[in-house]
Amino acid sequence: MSEENKVLSPLPGIFYRKPSPDKEDYVKEGDPVKKGDTIGLVEVMKNFYEVKAEKDGVLEKFFIENESEIAAGQEIATIS
Amino acid sequence: MIKVKNPGLETTVQDYGRIGYYNVGMPPSGAMDKYSYTVGNILVGNDENAASLEITYMGPVLQFQEDAVIAITGGEIPPKINGESVPMWETLSVKSGDELSFDFVKKGARVYLAVAGGIEVPLIMESRSTYTLCGIGGMEGRALQEGDELTIGTNKKQDVKEGTSLPDEYRLDFSGDNEIRVVLGLCSYRLTEDSKKRFFEREWTVTTEANRVGYRFKGERLHFMEREQPFGAGSNASNVVDLGYPIGSIQVPDGVEPIALLNDAVTGGGYVTICTIISTDLDKMAQVKTNEKVRFVSVDIEEALQARNEYRDTVEKVRQFVAK
């Protein structure tokens, strides 16, 4: 798998797949995504940072569950 | 002039701090990791209170619009000039048009960008440090934003030769455990003996609520001695009659989730502070990331002062090394 397909977290924190607890996921596995689409949030320093797709494609797989701890540089998902 | 093409997560202008106003409720702000900040200024020949950029977790993208001498110190957020990796802890020269960017954070949480001459912003209460909660100091009282233009100042004392590289012994070492030394007090007498013991026995995890104001930790509930609350204290067992909070003091509101108060924190209030991080270890605390674990170690004031003297010796050795 090429490195370019990986979406990595630039930050440590807590990862969320949805904008708020009562909302739908930003994107589900198998959904098409466009460059710049938000695919999740990382909570850190009392703020939320939007993780965006860096290319057009299909979101193949998430490697981290909603509301779990994430490290900087950890793989979030792949886009093919 | 330095143009901000991307501000990073939270990049602020900081100097040594707004010292001398704590008694009127103004926290010092200033660089969280003083050692890295100070060494950065030494490596570019600056006055040691010159303002630098404090970069947290995610680096900015900066374009230099004039030639400059810079140094990047602190945690490991690998810097690149025009896409090529450049070393940290070294005097670097950049040309007008060069672009400085950073890779993902590898170690630590913060790096400092020192520029020969310092970052020029207005002095507010004798400091250029940004205090975002009050919106004063630094760049209009806030973190950098895309499109900002930073002026390079004149706080340079001497020239430092390009390529001056700090030996490993003077660079931050992240191989050790995150042991943070504290001095017990002011209100540790309020904890039960068992809770006092548990506080030092266990590891505490840094939560997402960790920034320049304070670091909040997860672990276990701590318990206080039973008593009838005195006049002037709140009704919770973690309340005391208002007192000044030492910088680096750790309070435990309601016994859950200890909070270390740092550079931008409130200066006083009515919560029990159980111990205070020693000044040298505040630098270490500033380099601990969310989700990482720390252990607190109790030391006496003599050991804290000895650590401070050793710190000053190290800074002096760095000065002499760079001056050679």
Image (tube, rainbow, N blue to C red):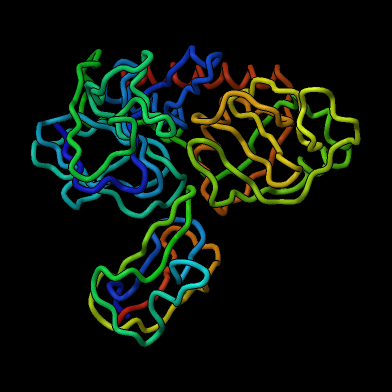
Query: Is residue B5 found left or right of B102 in the rendered image?
Result: left
- Check the image and report above or below for B27 versus B191: above
Point out residue B86 in the picture as x, y percentages from the top left corner.
Answer: 25, 44
Q: Is residue B89 visible?
A: no
* B54 horizontally vs B302: left or right: left
Q: Residue at x 25, y 16 (%)?
A: B155
Q: Position of residue B321 (x, y in %)?
A: 36, 20
Quarter containing the N terminus of chain A: bottom left
Residue found at x 67% / y 33%: B250
Q: Is residue B249 left or right of residue B254?
A: left
Residue B52 position (above or below residue A19) = above
| Res B254 quadrant in image | top right
Q: Position of residue B206 (x, y in %)?
A: 59, 48
Depth check, front residue: B282 or A51: A51
Q: Quadrant of residue B319?
A: top left
Between B116 and B158, the residue placed more toward the observer is B116
Q: Residue B267: image x %, image y %?
A: 58, 24
Quadrant in the picture for residue B46: top left
Pick the quarter of the image with the C terminus of chain A: bottom left
